[in-house]
Amino acid sequence: MLNYLINGISLGSVYAIIALGYTMVYGIAKMLNFAHGDVIMIGGYVAYCATSYLGWPVLFCVLASVVVCIVLGIVIERLAYKPLRNASSLAVLITAIGVSYFLQNIALIIWTSNPKSFPNMVTLPPLVIGGLQISSVALVTIAACIVIMIALTLFTGKTKMGKAMRAVSEDKDAARLMGINVDATISLTFAIGSGLAAIAGVLLCSAYPTLMPTTGAMPGIKAFTAAVFGGIGSIPGAMLGGILLGIIEIFGKAYISTQLSDAIVFSVLILILLVKPTGLMGKKVNEKV
Amino acid sequence: MKKMSKSARSSFINYGIVIVFFVIFQVLSSAGKLSSSLSGQLIPICTYVVMALALNLVVGISGELSLGHAGFMSVGAFSGVVAAVSLQNSVTAAPLRLMIAIITGALLAAVTGVIIGFPVLRLQGDYLAIVTLAFGEIIKNILNCLYIGADSNGLHFSMKDGNSLNMEPGGTVIINGPMGALGIQKISTFLSAVILVLIVLFIIQNLVNSRAGRAIKAIRDNRIAAESCGLNIMKYKMMAFVVSAAMAGAAGALYALNYSTVVPKKFDFNTSILILVFVVLGGIGNLRGSIIAAAILTVLPELLRQFQDYRMLVYAIVLILVMIITNNSKAKAFIGSITGRFTKKAAVKE
């Protein structure tokens, strides 16, 4: 029981880190970055290559993966999303799906569809408290999640760039009048989101060590569910939503049905959207006519 | 021809295209000029044409992005297979059985559409898209652990495994969880597929040009204005969604009865995206475009077999480029400066 709870929190922490990327991008660019899950997958592959082929130490692998993903995130934003800044949300969403497909197929061509077994990046002994054994991956994941959460809250709350970010998400035109470089701020948001995706990729693959071009898709969608669950646009909401979703998934798997666990997670999404469309911590926005 | 309205003329051109397509391929195949891989593609082409038309009704006419249409297709496919297999002995005429299977598929998919439509159509934009995606995954997930068998007592259902169906010794397992449906009799024919395309086309074209169709388009263009004119938003959105779901179900039944096996995994998110690609490349809201795009893009990979690995990559790039070109004012102006005709059209539109 307690074991399931810890597994759930650990999985939920990964979802939370991914969901943060979704929520920040949605908050600022008002778009659903469908390709976010595939950035995770690319991050996983980069870390895999760095450690298996180049034999780099763990920290460098993670760093390499973060750098590659940040560059990728900025390039995607500049090439695919920026030209559509004023287009309808349908157009942007279809473009994002296109980007997601592009990344999956690039990965398919480079790394083929054979699953790669990801080496365990966290080689610390498990923590034993009484009869309870907590794997080091779970501990590192939860710790990373907490650190990222605190860092992001401080960043958006205290720094100048964080304030600029909030201003842009509030009102783009007013922010531009105040001398904020809106394009740079949006790029920065994508960079942070993609960097977080890389970390999530490494953590996810350490816990579930099969790496395939489609690895990122499902966690990506689930993390979006988590972001909606917590209220999209809200950083603590993404955190809360992610962890709750992880717990629901693990408990669903353990007590209801392994095969239906995805169905359970998505049913939660649908229920939440019906009962409270703005999520647990979201703000209600009135539509202007 | 002069008395005919523009929309009626365009409808007849669409029927004409489908019939000409049918005649050409029928003649070619009876003359033995068609390669076996291409003649095997004829029914899938029709299926995808129907799927593209159905999705275009939701995405183009009703303006809601559905990412779960493969879910309706799979509901139609599996219910159609169950109907066809369980009637194998009582209804001996294959065309009649196929018709019953397609109608069953359409009805069950329509029921699923109603169940899904109520929660989904309250949402808008990105949320709606992601929830349809979620429903598509839920349907796939449930079908993956659904077991159905038939014996002399009727149908047996189970969510656990084939043994817990509690069937008599002579019973057959029709749907076997993740293994899908096995040993289906192939009763779909090219003629029936083309007839289905024509029926679907007929329904959509009449719906679009009717009072209800205009209401649906009004809601797409401005929901609030339409609502303040007294239109029942939910009713019209539901109409488009359920009709589209039923068509997808019919297409699914037709598709499944063309193969000896179908697995639930076939109807996943990728299939939904594939159909969306047909709709987007054919032109959102343009029925003729959907027909042509679906037909060409289904055949093309057969002809370009050596580029198989790059096909989806090219799709992805084309999808992104088409969206940018049609939605970015700079790109539009650039294209317009090359072809003067385009700008004139765009200016009239706006």
Image (tube, grey):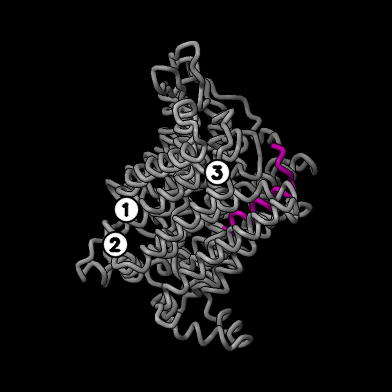
Q: Secondary structure at mark 1?
A: loop
> What chain letter is assigned to the residue under label 1?
A
Q: Are marks 1 and 2 in contact (CB under 8 Å)?
A: yes
Total labels drawn: 3
Identify residue for label 1. A278
Q: Residue A284: name its quadrant.
A: bottom left
Q: CA distance from mark 3 to mark 2?
A: 44 Å
- Residue A285 is tagged as 2
Question: Which region of the structure is painted magenta?
Answer: A98-115
Three-letter amino acid code at the position of disc 1? Thr
Q: In the shown orientation, is residue B37 left or right of residue A38? A: right
Q: In the shown orientation, is residue B132 left or right of residue B25? A: left
Q: In the shown orientation, is residue A50 left or right of residue B201? A: right
Identify residue for label 3. B255
Q: Are marks 3 and 1 in contact (CB under 8 Å)?
A: no
Three-letter amino acid code at the position of disc 3? Tyr
Q: Are marks 3 and 2 in contact (CB under 8 Å)?
A: no
